[in-house]
Amino acid sequence: MKKIYLIIALLAIIGCGSTKKNTTAETSKPQLQLPVFSADSAYAFCAAQCSFGPRTMNSEAHDLCEEWIAGKFQQYGLEVVRQKATLKLFDGTPVNATNIIASYKPQLDNRILLCAHWDTRPWADNDPDSANWRKPVLGANDGASGVAVLIELARLITASDSLNIGIDFICFDAEDSGIPQWSDHYDEGNSWALGSQYWALNPHKQDYKARFGILLDMVGGQGAKFYKEGFSVDYASAVVDKIWSAAHGIGYGSYFQMAPVGYITDDHVAINQDAHIPTVDIVPYIADCPSSSFGPTWHTVFDDMNHIDRNTLEAVGQTVVAVVYGED
């Protein structure tokens, strides 16, 4: 992740500090009896991915983590497909990519797409120390957090097994090897999100359709707040409203801010533009962090488990639960 283009003026000042769930002003109870998202479980899934080390393309850690992710989805009874492709990075380097698709009730036509990316950045090119710019990023937040939330969602959905809609969990590969800041190559934006670009033009099932999609990117960071991203509003405004309303309805409005930000190059772009599935990017925006609006650990060697917040994982995970079960 990525690049952010035009930033629209925000309605509030946002800090880099920890965000806690408001237990007084935001205690409205959901009308539905929702399964409870376990932040502890998601945190453990995040740590498990990080235990392999950076999951950079063509690395042993990447291959080992692929097996672990696919195995977790299979453990919860989902049908797993691995979509293999040889893709080329911005400099022509070939990489062996695997999109991992796990399907709940694959026989149903009425479906929702939930996705994240599982690879990690090969270069910490936004690190405050230039000596780290060519070191790989562990990717606890930028990569592992989104996948961890997906796996926990798969666990609780299959445990209750009460949904009458199908869910496709897709872990996209080769998202985070876009042109580094120290490179002389011109960045047009298409060097990012290679796995989702490939899938959008070559879906795992012919004529694949989903009612809508939700992309989770960097959803475990300390102090994270989520604003309405530009492409999401342009292509999936009704889904944006659905998600943000759900978050406010179950007490997580302090995380999901009712204001827009700019356009972010991420996996949802190809899903919207090429697969024509209205898809929303839940991605943080922290206005007053001088190093990056994505937060202080973005593309640095500090993107590790020390900066993962269970409260953020819970806010995002339980919100997605509310959206999915509200569709049933």
Image: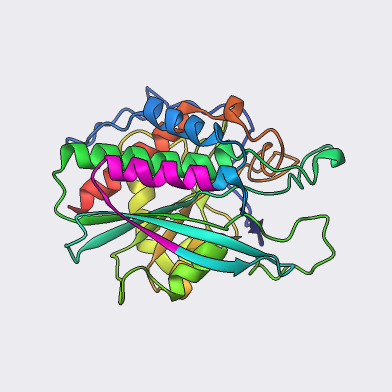
| Residue at image location 40% in from the left, 25% down from the top | 40
Residue 79, by quadrant, is bottom left
Locate residue 184, reporting x and y percent: 85, 64
Res 99 seen here = yes
Q: Quadrant of residue 297?
A: top right
- Taken as a whole, is the magenta stretch helix, strand or loop? helix
Q: Residue at x 36, y 30 (%)?
A: 26
Identify the magenta region.
63-83
Magenta residue check for 82: yes
Q: Is residue 75 magenta?
A: yes
- Residue 59: percent from the left, percent from the top? 62, 48
Q: Position of residue 318 (x, y in %)?
A: 33, 37
Residue at 65% x, 43% y: name it: 287
Residue 21 higher or lower than 289, as above or below: above
Location of residue 170 by image quarter: bottom left
Q: Viewer-proximal residue, 49 or 228?
A: 49
Q: What x and y, as percent, mark residue 215?
A: 44, 54
Nearer to the camera, 251 or 133: 133
Above or below residue 132? Residue 304 is above
